[in-house]
Amino acid sequence: MKMENEEDKSDRRKFLKLGALAGGAVLLGSAISKAVSLENPKETGEKVKVLTADGKLVEVDSCHLKHHPAVSQMAILESRKGIEGKKFIMVIDLGRCGNARKCIEGCQKMHHKAAPTEWIKVKEMKDEGLSSPYWMPQPCFHCDNPPCTKVCPVDATFKREDGIVLIDNERCIGCRFCMAACPYNARSFNWADPVLPFGATEEAYSPETSFPAKRGTVEKCDFCPDMGKHGILPDCVTACPNGTIFYGDENEDSVTNGEDTFRLSELLKNRAGYRYLEDLGTEPRVYYLPPVNRNFPFEEDTVAHNTEDYKAI
Amino acid sequence: MNTEHQILTPELAEKQSLRREEMRADVLRPLEKIGMLGKLWIAFLVIILLIGCYAYYLQLKDGLIVTGLRDYATWGIYISNFVFFVAISLVGALISSVLRFTNFTWYRPITRIAEIIAVAGVCWAGLIIIVDMGRPERLLNLFTHPRLQSPILWDVVVVSTYLTTSVLLLYLPLLPGIAICRNTLTNKPKWQRWMYKFLALGWTGTEQQWKIMKRSIKMLCIIIIPLAISIHTVTSWLFAMTLRPGWDSTNFGPYFVAGAFLAGTACVIIGMFVFRKVYHLEKYITEVHFDHMGKLLVFLALIYFYFNVNEYFVPYYKMKGAEARLLNDLFSGQFAGLYWSAQLFGMFLPAVLLIFKKMRKPGIITLIAVPVVVFAWVKRYLIVTPILLNPYLPIQDVPESWMNYFPSWVEIAIVSASLAGVLLIITIFARLFPIISIWETLENEGIELEDLDKLNNEKA
C-alpha cells in the first residue's frame, strides 16, 4: 500500500515536471518563433519535450514551437484571480527615507517606464505649521475598498484575492474615470505611444507585469505580483539605500526590506503604523511608520526633479 | 386650452381654416428658399466642423498627448463640454413637459425650439464623450464587458434613453407639420419630398391618428421628467461618486439639475430671438413670450443661487483641510476671475436685472441670456479642472505643464466643432421642418385642428 502510494506520488511529480517543462517550452518557443521566419523554420538543434493533446510526450526541435495567442489570453484571465493564500502588503518607514529617489529609478527601470511617469513618487510632506517636514514615498495603496475599481465601466481594473489592484490594458477604454476617482493620484495615463524596449510589442501582455504598456490606457504601480509570487522583492524595495520600504505577506505576518525582516503585527503595533488618510475609508494596503527617530535630518531638496514633459511631441 | 370648446359651425370652420392657411404660409415661408446669409451661416458651421474633424484625426493619430491634459488634470474641456451639452438638453423636458402640466399655454409656440435644442445637445454629448476616450475603438467593451456598478454605465443607459425619448417628443408633435410639408412643398428636390412622405407616416389627420398622437405625447411627457432629472443627476455622479474634495458632495445632483434648467432656458431665449428675427415670426413668438421666459429665468436663477450657496458657502464656512485649498483657489486664487464672472453674469445679474419688466424685452433679454449660456459653459469648466488640480496629496516633481491645465488648439478645435455641430443640427432642422408647431399654437387660439381635420375628412 505504502509502496504504491509512493509510486503514485513520484508519478505525479514526474507529470508535473513534464507539465512545467512543456509550459516553459511554449514560452521559449514564443521567443524563438519570432526570431525565425515562420514559412521556413530552421532547425535549431535544440530539442524540447512537449506534451501532445492525446497525452504523449514527444521531443521536437524548438523551431517547430509556435506561440499560441490563447495562452496569453488565459494568462490575463488567470491574473484576475490572484495568488492563492497571499495577502500582499507594504510598510514604509518614513523615519528612514532620505529622498534618495532610488525607488523611483528602480521602479522605472524594472517596468521600462520613462520619465515623467512615476509609479512611485516621493513627496515632501508637512502635516501642519509646527510639525517638521518629511519625505513620503507613495506607491499605489492597493486599497481593500478601492474607489478606482468601483467606477470602472468595463471591469478593466480589478481587485484580486491577494489584495492587489491591477489593470488589464487590453480591456481599458481610456475613460480615466479611475484616475479621477483615486484620491491619491496613484494612476498614470499613456498619453502618447509609450517608449518601449526593442521588440517589446511582440511580448505577451500580462496585467501582472503591466508590460508592454499601450497608448490610451491607464497604468499604475502593480505591486509586482510576478516577482512576489517567486519570493523576489520589488525593485523599489531593493533599490532603496536606506531600506525604507518593506514588502511582505499579511497572511505570513511578515515584511522585509531585504535586510531586516519584521513581524508585521508587532512592527505596526510598536511603531504606531498608520494608513494615509484613514478617514476616506479606502482601507489602503500600504502602512506608514511615522517619521520619528530619523536616519537623516530633513534637508530641503535643491534640485527640481522630473521637469521634462513627454519627448514624443 | 384657454378657451371653452366651441361647437364647430360651418362658418366658424371656414374662419378657422383661413387662420390655419395664414399660419401655414407664415411658418412655411422660411423653408422655401435659403438666402445668401443662410448659406454662409451653414458654410461657416461646416468649416468649423471640418477643422474639428481634422483635429480629431490628429488626436487619433498621436493620442491624447495632443491635448493639454496630463496625469493630474486628467479631464478637461471635453468633459466640461459633455456636462454642458447634457445640461442644455434638459430644457426640452422643462419647456415641453413640465410646463404642460401647468395651466399655462403661452409656451406652446416655443416647445419645438426647446426640443430641437435638447436633441442636438444630447446627440453631441454622446459624441464628445467618445472624443475624450483614450481607446475609442474599444467603445463596444461597454456592451461586451459592462459593469453595472459604474456610473458611466448608468450614463450610457440614461443618455441613450433620453435621446430616444427626446427624438420621439420632437417627432410625434411634428407629424401634422411634416404632412403639411409633404402636401405643400411640392417644388422641393426629390429626396426632400420623399423624406417628407416617409416621415409623415401617412398622416392624414384622421380622428384616430390625432388620438394616438396626443395620447403618446402625454405619455412621453410623463416619462421624460424622471429621465431628464436622472440624466443630469447621473452626470453629476461622475464627480460626486469620487472622494475628491470639491466633488465629494451630496448636493451635486440638484445643483446640476438646477444649473441645467437655467442654462437651457437661456439657450431657448436666444433661439427664440434668432428665429423670430430671421424667420419673421413676430406674430407667433411675441414679446409676451420673452416676458414669460424672463420671469422663468429669474425663478431658475434664484433656485440655482440657492444650490450654489449650499455648494460653496457651506464648505467655505467650515474651511475643512483640502477643501479650503480648493475654495481659496476659486475665490481668490488662479480661478477667481472666471469663478466670480460665472457667478455674476451667469446667475446674479440675470436674477436681478430680469425682475424689471423693461429688461424682459426681446433684445435686452437676449443680451442677458448670451452671457448666461457662455458662463454656464465656464462654470462646468470650473466644476472639472480646479478640483483635479487641488488633490489631497500635493502635486510635486512633475513637469510645469502638469501643474496647470490649458486646453491645446486640438481640444479647442474639437469643442468648437461640437458647438458648431449643435448649431448645425438646429439650423438644418429649422430649414426642413416648421420651427413652430402649427396645431399647438392654434390650440392656444381656440382652434382645434383635430376638429377641422375631422370636418374636412367627413366632407371628403
Image (cartoon, rainbow, N blue to C red):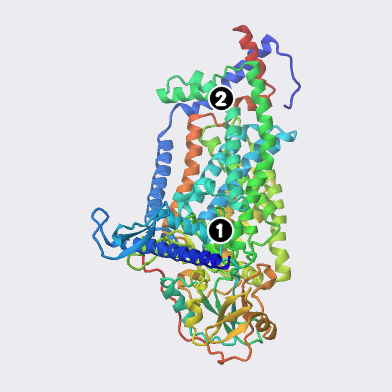
Using residue B401 as the reference point, say whether residue B439 is left or right of it: right
Looking at the rendering, which quadrant does residue B453 occupy?
A: top right
Residue A177 bears which disc, if any?
Answer: 1
**Can the viewer see residue B433 in this picture?**
yes
Q: Nearer the viewer, residue B334 or A82?
A: A82
For label 1, the SS is helix
Residue B177 bears which disc, if any?
Answer: 2
Q: Residue at x 62, y 64 (%)?
A: A146
Q: Is residue B220 above or below residue B150?
A: above
Q: Residue at x 43, y 28 (%)?
A: B33
Q: Is residue A165 above or below residue B53?
A: below
**Can the viewer see residue B338 in this picture?**
no
Looking at the rendering, which quadrant does residue A131 occupy?
A: bottom right
For label 2, the SS is helix
Using residue B98 as the reference point, say whether residue A259 is left or right of it: left
Q: Pinpoint the chain carrying mark 2.
A: B
Quarter containing the N terminus of chain B: top right
Judged by depth in the image, the label closer to the viewer, 1 or 2, is 1
Using residue A47 as the reference point, say whether residue A255 is left or right of it: right
Q: CA distance from mark 1 to mark 2?
A: 44 Å
Percent of width and height locating residue B88: 59, 46
Badge 2 amino acid: Gly
Disc 1 residue crowd, few under 14, some 14–19, many 20+, Cα 10 Å: many
Q: Nearer the viewer, residue A263 or B313?
A: A263
